[in-house]
Image (cartoon, coloured by chain):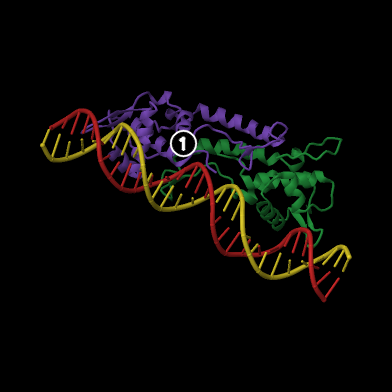
Chain colours: A purple, B green, C red, D yellow
Amino acid sequence: MKLITRNTDYALRAICFIAESGKEVVSVSSLFEALGVPRPFLRKILQILHNHGVLKSWRGKSGGFSLLRGPKTIFLWDIMRIFQGRFCLNECFLRKRLCPNIKKCILRGKINRIEKYVFSELKEITIDCLLGHSKIKKIVIRR
Amino acid sequence: MKLITRNTDYALRAICFIAESGKEVVSVSSLFEALGVPRPFLRKILQILHNHGVLKSWRGKSGGFSLLRGPKTIFLWDIMRIFQGRFCLNECFLRKRLCPNIKKCILRGKINRIEKYVFSELKEITIDCLLGHSKIKKIVIRR
DNA sequence: GACAAATGATACTATGATTGTATCATTATG
DNA sequence: CATAATGATACAATCATAGTATCATTTGTC
């Protein structure tokens, strides 16, 4: 079980790369070469990020994508929400129906406590947290 | 994303029911009636629990399953391991290969910290924790 | 001993989410 | 006006989870 799915992961790699590239606009081509993420999949992911107001896009020749906001104001949590929907560690179903015991369930309470902690930790993480911040502007593929 | 999958969930329900039933041996039939879990699936789950030394089984007419150990010595963690394998919130893959950046990855470190906490919380939970412990021995369907 | 009711073992199927591909339309640059 | 980029969107593959089916074996009861 993964906390972060592949598309969120790829999105993060792409955003970090754009943030660290120092360029105004980064094309799918250069992202593809740098990250090794499947090209059409990467494209789709970038378009979704654009549609959700994370990236700015530039169409036409020498077009590409750039960040709409600074790395300190882009949160991992938001990216996860975009690709993974509502976060929930509990799935209280019994044969596709809500479990009839949901109110009394002791385990549910315990999982919810854990979930709360995980939430709060994840919510702290920004793209800026994930960058290398090395003085030498070396491009590094990172998650 | 679920912390606990359906089969683990059903296994827990079954174990709790057996623990609370007060009977020596509980058949799949009675578990099925009480829990509403798909019968053949339930059977499979119980057999797996038996093979992993969680349940004792009694073959032949009026057979069934019983707990091999007391509820205080059966851990949620063990049941999860049986059905969900090794617990891991990180999946550091890039196109089916281990991500080349795995050592420097900052996100990885953060997820691992969260994982550690989740581990430690889950490891505390025993079947006994999940039981109702009401004086009146009322059978309740619970997770 | 025959039958019925239980589990043992195991192979198969269905479903759904994730992951990825393909294609055509549109836009901007040189 | 050709080319290289994104926009939109439908389609396909893969995989894990969830669930089913079947035959063999064991045991209690009449």
- Determine whether, in the image, residue C25 is placed left or right of residue A136: left
Residue B74 visible in the snapshot: no
The reply, left or right, for residue A91 in relation to residue A31 is right
Q: Quadrant of the C terminus of chain B?
A: top right
Query: What is the x, y in percent for residue A112?
Result: 64, 32
Task: Name the residue at 68% across, 52% down.
Answer: B39
Task: Choose between B74 and C22: the one closer to the eye.
Answer: C22
Are there few (<14), some (14-19), or many (20+) residues within 10 Å of tag 1?
A: some
Which of C18/B43 is in front?
B43
In this figure, which residue is indicated by the disc labeled 1? Answer: B106
* Vertical arrangement, residue B62 with respect to residue B7, above or below: below
Q: Chain of mark 1?
A: B
Amino acid identity at mark 1: Ile
As displayed, is residue B84 above or below residue A7?
A: below
How many circles with numbers are drawn on the protein? 1
Residue A108, how many percent across, how many down? 67, 34
User: Residue A127, relative to residue D18: is it above or below?
Assistant: above
Q: Quadrant of the N terminus of chain B?
A: top right
Residue A78 placement (x, y as % from top left) = 46, 28
Q: Is residue B62 left or right of residue B81?
A: right
Residue at the spot 37% in from the left edge and 29% down from the top edge: A51
Q: Quadrant of residue A54?
A: top left
Residue drawn at (35%, 24%), measured in percent from left and top? A68
Nearest the camera: B17 or A14?
Answer: B17
Q: Is residue B90 above or below residue A51?
A: below
Q: Looking at the picture, tell me which residue is in the foreground, B139 or A24.
A: B139
* SS under mark 1: helix
Residue B6 visible in the snapshot: yes
